[in-house]
Amino acid sequence: MRFVNLGAAVLVSAALLYAAFFGAGPLPALGPAFNPVTGAWTMAADASSYGGQTLRLKGLMQPARVVLERDGTAHVIAATDHDLFVAVGYVHAKFRLFQMDLLRRQGEGRLSEVVGKAALESDRFELQLGLLRTAQLEWSQLTGSQASRDALLAYAQGVNDRIGEAESQHQLPAMFTLLGYKPQPWTPIDSLIVKGDMTQTLNFTDTPLVMALLEKSLGPDLTAEWFPVLPPNQQSPYEPGPYAPKAVPEQIPTLPVAPALLTTAETDSVAALYERLAALPAGLIAKGGESNNWAVAGSRTASGGALMAGDPHLHLTLPAIWFQLTEDSPGYHTSGVSIPGTPVVLIGHNQHISWSLTDAQNQQTFFYLEKEDPARAGQYFWNGAWQKYGTADYDIPVLGAATEHLAVKYSVHGPVISERGLTTTVWWAGNIPSQDLDVLLHIGQAANFTQFRDALRGWHSPTHNFVYADDQGNIGLISAGYYPQVATGRPWLPMPGTGEYDVVGTIPYDDIPQVYDPPNGVVWSANQRPVAGDYPYYIGTASNFFNPGYRANEINRVLGQDKKFTAADMMALQTDTRDYLASEIVPLLVDALAPEHLTGNEKAVFDLLAKWDDRMEINSSAATVWWTFWQEYLGATFDAWWRSHNVKVDRAELNDALGQDLEAWSLRDPTNPAFTLVGSAENAQDVMKAAFQSTVTLLGTRLGAEPTQWTWGRIHTRELENLAQITGLNYGPVPDRGDANTPLAAPDFPSTHGPSWRMIVDWGVGSFNGIYPGGQSENPASDWYTNRVTTWWDGRYAPMLDAAHAAAARGAVTWRLES
Amino acid sequence: MSAAVRFATVSIAGAAIGLLGILLGAWWLVFPVGVAAGALLPRARWAVPAGALSGLVAWTVPLGYAQVQYGLRATSLSLAAIIGFNGAATIPVTLTLLVGLLLGLTGAWLGAAARGLFPTRAPGPVQKLRDERLEVVDPVLAKR
């Protein structure tokens, strides 16, 4: 009996100790995780550690200060530029260390090491795509004379100062404790990786694969008609021309060394790769941007100074992608938002100029199908000769499993990312070194448009629309970055890799889309095609690469009004919920419906639409009807074609492109043959009526019999998602206004993308305002985790103070940093 | 020393040692403390509660201090969300205290079970007492 007792005690003890040391199932290692002194409970101490204090940073050369406003906005004041970046690194790590570690792990393909097999496919893909190699190359190419080299080194020192301090004080963010690992020292390459993450999110696309699958199923004629290079609808390019004649493409310095229809084998390869990319976690493939920026010249404003507005739309996360700060040193006086992991202000202002950016959306991703011969293993045919693939080997540590070895192959076009069927390589501009941080440091020091434009000459990827305004009333917009040009062929499809279709260069910098002080006194971008149809270069197709243009059209409409604009007007436009597409289509629908033939709820719904102001407000039932109708209209028009042609691509994924067609046909070509597959329909009006009837039936079933109760807020919500995908730490979902077409962008259900930062500048009165949804701290126990959300949600702003005013503001605290 | 005093002494000493371990990052120390309690106290019915109590106290004191110092509600809610019990702020607290308690308890159980294999010196045969009353000569009876 005694042995039985002892055996039971040993077994239970062993099980408990195992769970305590190593965790069990979903539970973390219980001992270190719940240790009240050094475990996850320390987030309480961290949340209370933001008060005034004196801190020691080894990397500092002279004392520095950090002023924290009551809402957490940080003002870093240093006596040298080096110390500025040390302090910024420290501050970033103090508030966002786990986020920074996640971002670098994502780009470096090291997520599996801490979360296990679930992240393995993401890691494989990232290592194949090559963010790590590009970051290493960028670092190796930075010379001592480039400001970003010193900034990156100093920044890394500051981050590591914080890591050392947090470890010694048992204050590492709780997620490290719960996942059971400690952060490695930060390096400059990690910062370049974080920059690469953003490039990938914004510019790496699978559109050529989609186009290839469409061409195979719908046929070349229908594909060309429905997914054209130039948009079929009316858009508002910010640079309408005239343009200089086409010039010889500028050489892209660091490039590595009319096709027939795809064969079945080629299509199978494309389909396999498309499926692989589609299965990757959200955010690794760019799926179209939703950002706005614009500026109004001083001649058209009430204050007499230039106005500027910017709201980049990104995945809305907690913590946010942004960290608000002011950088003050002898060389820099910038204020705005930075990305934790990088030392610079990405969007903001200095003493003379302000800037913001949106994604330009031109094509920067090209796929090549390599020609191989089974008798020549490890080789591909290019420029008339057989070439050997280059290789790079990686080990991917996997939590709870054996380390995986990955061998990545390269052709001259780039990395091999699929070998199912034919070998497919990808040429991606994000793989070409682009010293974006250096550019941003120069922008931060620019005092006029010439310096701003000169700085952007070095910006290659991702291509962004940089809006500009200055203290002299001037405005401008430059879509800076590479615009790859191929020698021949159709670059929107995968192309043969034999050499004839290679990228040969980029549009010369002087010819890329740009304007300065245009006669109408306004510039604007909202991911629309920036140039008109007669622009002499290929920059991408209407499908997916560029936004359909409804936000840009609405912004253009508002800014086209004959009035003197104010900052309040800019704020109103950033939260504008008018759906430009609805303003075009709803009148057609109302005309198509004969009220006398409508019955029951159809008449009530008709009345709602007829009186609607096209605004997607929470309490609007007409907004719900419009949105549902548009989806039904799209489905009624195209689903039959999808079925009859066995199209493999999800139709909903192409709604932006198909919507442009449907809009154009409804307005100008109502008898387009596309409508004829819908039952007995013969034209757009017939399909509209059918879609309206199904809308009324659908909403009645889903939301009840009373149409006035079908409010938009009942079906449309917004949610801020926790970055670590812990749903309990999300904010929302909460009913919210807007849709994919409104300047206040809120696509999807629930909407998890949208204005990630709103900034308004009025140079006439020297006012700067900004807000982002979230808070400065990643610690969910901190008041600064979500303290800005309500202000943002309500469409309000917070003043962006300079350091002196911030220090004097109520509730501000100061950290004294000493070496 | 009475059993109750020995129980209290071992419990208090165990809690103090366990607490010191936690403060130094050695959260696991309450387990060997429990083992020691099991080995020191002669009966399991005293040893196991002593181990459990020392573990519980060692883990409760710093948590209580943190509650007084910072307030733990927001942290507890956050931890609950992270481990999948959204809104249940008491669960992380309960889980934390349970870890301390179980480490001490199982340690003591193990110690007591091991001690059971090595009993103290066994008692010898009971010495038979002479019943002297049988030898008493009753003077009354004797006269008869």
Image (cartoon, rainbow, N blue to C red):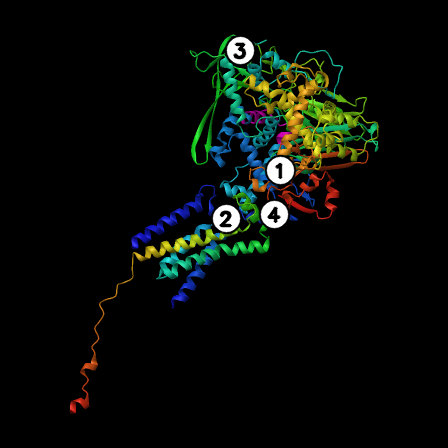
Mark 1–mark 4 CB contact (< 8 Å): no
Q: In this view, does B92 lie above or below A575?
A: below
Q: Does the magenta stretch include residue A143?
A: yes
For the residue marked with disc 1, what is the amino acid? Leu
Instruction: Between label 1 and label 2, give the one nearer the viewer.
Output: 1
Q: Callout 4: 10 Å neighbours few (<14), some, many (20+)?
A: many
Q: Mark 2 points at which residue?
A: A34
Magenta region: which residues?
A132-150
Subunit of label 1:
A
Q: Name the residue under label 3.
A: A498
For the residue marked with disc 4, what is the amino acid? Ala
Q: Do labels 1 and 3 share a chain?
A: yes
Which quadrant of the figure contains the C terminus of chain A? top right
The numbered mark, 3 or 2, whose residue comes first in the sequence reads 2
Q: Are marks 4 and 3 on the same chain?
A: yes
The numbered mark, 1 or 4, whose residue comes first in the sequence reads 4
